[in-house]
């Protein structure tokens, strides 16, 4: 081959694969507020389609906020929704969310469609089922909805439900495929992406059926606008949600949503707790997903913040109390920033945390950065330094957990490499034994952020256990 053609081949190959490598990587694997809000809207529809008909097209007429250019027979639409029967809610699955975000990114680059073309920017796989599996989903992928140019999360929601378009009766698409996907009872999990770009959102639903005996999901939020529904910016993260038997637990994401896989279909009680306050609800036996929400009363937050402020204000400001004041300020900031408070409490809070706020934020940011970049030497130096500075404070456990999970990450990564290199040797028995050791080591972790990371490690090994490769 001549140098001219060799150079051309290399150039073309580089060009193609540089596009193929442009696969979306989210800054955070957890769902955003817009994505959790989208799921709340979807579940509202699934659990009460008749009520959704009254919201979108009250009495069979165009509802408020429905653009005039949407030319559909709203009476027909209304009657179709009134004929639907309620189905159980869905929970957000992070692997399905990863697949949905990747496809939304692909559509931003290349235009709307369900099939991806090899070599194009953001390409993952041709079909949605394979994209879900490549994202790590171990359940059964079942359906996909796409809306690449939605002006808001809510607009995307009504777009899928109305299903306007050519080819079907009433100005709606034949078979109402998007709406049908949203209402299928066989699904129990979903990944809903809402990627912002150019003032719009690229929205993708990836729906599937997970393998847990039962699921629970919902939102933990502060209802700031008092409308009785979760809205963007109202979510509360790091709230523990557990089953009454203690066998299943998780923590809410920063956006306030959560998903919990359950081991039993028996009678169930779920408990949510934050800062010493808890809320619980009982559910009948069954295999269908249950929805458990907690709208945290402002009164509970006020009681807690007043208690914290009273504690720090009662410490005399003297050189001998410097350590006690620092410990109290760290506690006030770490707990207080998760609470709702009035103007008076906010002013006092800011006064007491002004000397620690920026330091804590910067220290946590650096630890997270070093943790994710695998900067082993720098990470250990920073951890050692912070352990001394924050000894006896509420942040001490967080630092210890960062150090512990950093080491576990290396162990998990090494195990995955061994499975890849020697699949026959690393059989199902070995994988299950290793999974149990990871699950047992979770008990050494105390803070919500790193408990989630430990759950992520366990899920990675669980995927290997379920893999067909032995």
Image (spheres, grey):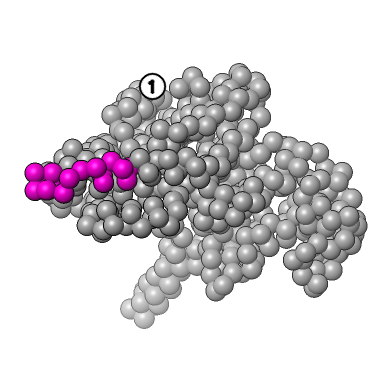
Q: Where is residue 408, by image quadrant?
A: top left
Quarter of image, res 9 = bottom left
Segment tinted magenta in the rendering:
308-322
Q: Main secondary structure of the magenta part?
A: helix
Direction bottom: furthest residue:
4
Mark 1, Cα crowd under 10 Å, few <14 / some 14-19 / many 20+, is few
Let me know if residue 9 is in the magenta part.
no
Q: Which residue is mark 1?
A: 429
Above or below: residue 366 compared with residue 182: below
Does 294 sit left or right of 54 as displayed? left
The residue positioned 89% from the left and 57% from the top of the image is 60
- Tell me which residue sits at (52%, 52%) in the image: 234
Is residue 376 depicted above or below 165 in this figure?
above
Q: Quadrant of the N terminus?
A: bottom left
Residue 303 located left or right of residue 201: left
The answer to whether any part of residue 444 appears in the image is yes
State whether residue 20 is above or below residue 78.
below
Residue 314 lies in magenta, yes or no? yes
Residue at image location 22% in from the left, 57% down from the top: 355
The residue depicted at 88 percent of the width and 55 percent of the height is 59
Residue 403 seen by the camera: no
Name the residue furthest left: 320
Q: Quick one: 137 or 384, which is closer to the camera? A: 384
Please tell me which residue lies in front, 138 or 255.
255
Q: Position of residue 404 (x, y in %)?
A: 24, 37
Of residue 303 and residue 461, the one placed in the foreground of this image is: 303
Give residue 185's position: percent from left, percent from top: 72, 37
Counting from the top left corner in percent of width and height, residue 68 is at 81, 72
- Identify the element where label 1 is drawn: helix
Q: Position of residue 279 (x, y in %)?
A: 52, 32
């Amino acid at each position: 081959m001549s140098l001219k053609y060799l150079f051309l081949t290399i150039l073309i190959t580089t060009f193609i694969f540089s596009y193929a490598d442009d696969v979306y990587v989210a800054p955070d694997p957890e769902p955003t507020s817009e994505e959790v809000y989208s799921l709340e809207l979807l579940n509202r529809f699934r659990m009460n389609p008749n009520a959704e008909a009254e919201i979108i097209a009250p009495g069979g007429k165009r509802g408020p906020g429905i653009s005039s250019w949407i030319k559909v027979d709203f009476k027909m639409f209304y009657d179709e929704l009134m004929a639907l029967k309620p189905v159980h809610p869905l929970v957000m699955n992070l692997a399905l969310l990863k697949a949905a975000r990747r496809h939304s990114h692909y559509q931003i680059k290349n235009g709307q469609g369900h099939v991806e073309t090899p070599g194009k920017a953001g390409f993952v796989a041709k079909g949605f089922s394979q994209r879900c599996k490549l994202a790590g989903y171990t359940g059964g992928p079942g359906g996909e909805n796409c809306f690449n140019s939605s002006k808001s999360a809510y607009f995307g929601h009504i777009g899928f439900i109305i299903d306007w378009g050519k080819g079907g009766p009433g100005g709606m698409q034949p078979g109402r495929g998007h709406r049908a996907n949203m209402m299928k009872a066989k699904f129990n999990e979903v990944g809903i992406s809402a990627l912002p770009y150019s003032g719009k959102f690229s929205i993708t639903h990836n729906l599937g059926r997970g393998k847990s005996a039962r699921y629970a999901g919902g939102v933990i939020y502060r209802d700031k606008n008092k409308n009785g529904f979760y809205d963007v910016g109202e979510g509360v993260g790091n709230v523990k949600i557990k089953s009454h038997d203690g066998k299943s637990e998780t923590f809410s994401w920063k956006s306030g949503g959560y998903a919990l896989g359950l081991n039993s279909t028996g009678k169930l009680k779920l408990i949510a707790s934050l800062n010493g306050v808890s809320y619980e609800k009982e559910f009948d036996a069954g295999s269908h997903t249950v929805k458990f929400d907690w709208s945290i009363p402002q009164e509970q937050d006020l009681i807690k913040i007043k208690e914290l402020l009273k504690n720090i204000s009662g410490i005399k400001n003297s050189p001998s109390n410097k350590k006690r004041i620092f410990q109290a300020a760290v506690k006030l900031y770490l707990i207080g920033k998760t609470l709702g408070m009035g103007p008076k409490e906010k002013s006092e809070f800011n006064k007491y945390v002004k000397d620690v706020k920026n330091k804590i934020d910067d220290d946590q940011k650096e630890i997270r950065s070093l943790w994710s970049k695998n900067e082993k030497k720098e990470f250990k130096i920073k951890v050692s330094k912070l352990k001394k500075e924050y000894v006896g404070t509420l942040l001490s456990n967080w630092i210890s957990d960062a150090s512990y999970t950093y080491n576990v990450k290396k162990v998990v990564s090494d195990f995955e490499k061994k499975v890849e290199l020697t699949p026959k040797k690393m059989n199902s028995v070995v994988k299950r034994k290793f999974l149990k050791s990871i699950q047992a080591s979770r008990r050494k972790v105390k803070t919500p952020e790193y408990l989630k990371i430990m759950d992520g490690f366990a899920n990675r090994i669980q995927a290997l256990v379920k893999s067909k490769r032995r």
